[in-house]
Amino acid sequence: MKIVHLWLKFQVLIIQLGDKKFRPYLSAEEIAWAVSRVSEALNEKYNGKQPIVLGVLNGAFMFCSDLVKTLTCGPEIHFVKVSSYEGTASSGNLSRLIGISAELKDRHVILVEDIVDTGLTVDVLRKELAAMGPASVEVATLLFKPDAFRGSQKPDYTGLEIPNDFVVGYGLDYNNLGRELPELYVIND
Ligand code: 5GP
């Protein structure tokens, strides 16, 4: 009887997005803990520095929104965009950073990412931002996949390190689905 009950519960928790199934991975509470880890570290580092926060759309919209609510260092908040990521594997084809509305010269810049996978996106963005003459550039990410990483510099602030599996929810999508979910789900092969 107990086994049947668990099996039923498992079935209910699986979600379908397009042609793929996903199972629960991190609860809203676990995500909130990861967000607070990042915000505590940023508040300590940027106290009195009024950094420019650049949230990377679309994936980081939810993380960035929760993160800035707990920042006490007087951030200016902007959003930027790079080319989209389709399917469940990094395409490696990246367009340039677009939509910067802030003057970055001599300012401390914090790039806010949803997830650092290969690290190639962040490498490109760091270079582009550095060319704009900021006082500093650091990267804060909610999730980091160390096993997939092949970039030149790891994120400066990470909420949680995760295995090299495709996740959705909390702003992250699968072909534009699943961004609205308050929890994170992992692909169910
Ligand atoms: P990277 O250049 O580090 O390989 O990839 C960065 C971007 O790929 C992220 O900003 C995100 O949009 C996308 N990405 C990487 N891994 C995942 C994942 O597990 N799930 C989703 N939904 N997007 C991912």
Image: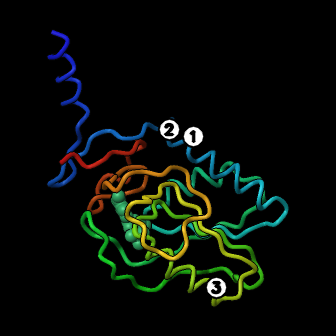
Q: Residue at x 61, y 59 (%)?
A: 157
Q: Is residue 107 left or right of residue 154?
A: right
Label 1 amino acid? Trp
Say above or below: 49 vs 99: above
Q: How is the image coloured?
A: rainbow
**Distance between the alpha carbons at the discs numbered 3 and 2:** 33 Å
Q: Residue at x 64, y 85 (%)?
A: 130
* Residue at mark 2: C-beta within 8 A of ligand 1: no
Marking on residue 30: 2
Q: Position of residue 121 (x, y in %)?
A: 45, 75
Q: Position of residue 55 (x, y in %)?
A: 56, 66
Across the whole image, how many numbered discs are drawn on residues?
3
Q: Are marks 1 and 3 in contact (CB under 8 Å)?
A: no
Where does the N terminus fall, quadrant-wise?
top left
Q: Which residue is mark 1?
A: 33
Q: Residue at x 68, y 73 (%)?
A: 109
Label 3 amino acid? Ala
Residue closest to the far bottom: 131
Q: Which residue is mark 3?
A: 130
**Distance between the alpha carbons at the discs numbered 1 and 3:** 31 Å
Disc 3 on helix, strand or loop? Answer: helix
Say above or below: 69 vs 91: above
* Disc 1: CA contacts within 10 A as few (<14), some (14-19) or many (>=20): some
Q: Position of residue 17 (x, y in %)?
A: 22, 51
Q: Earlier in the sequence, mark 3 or mark 2?
A: 2
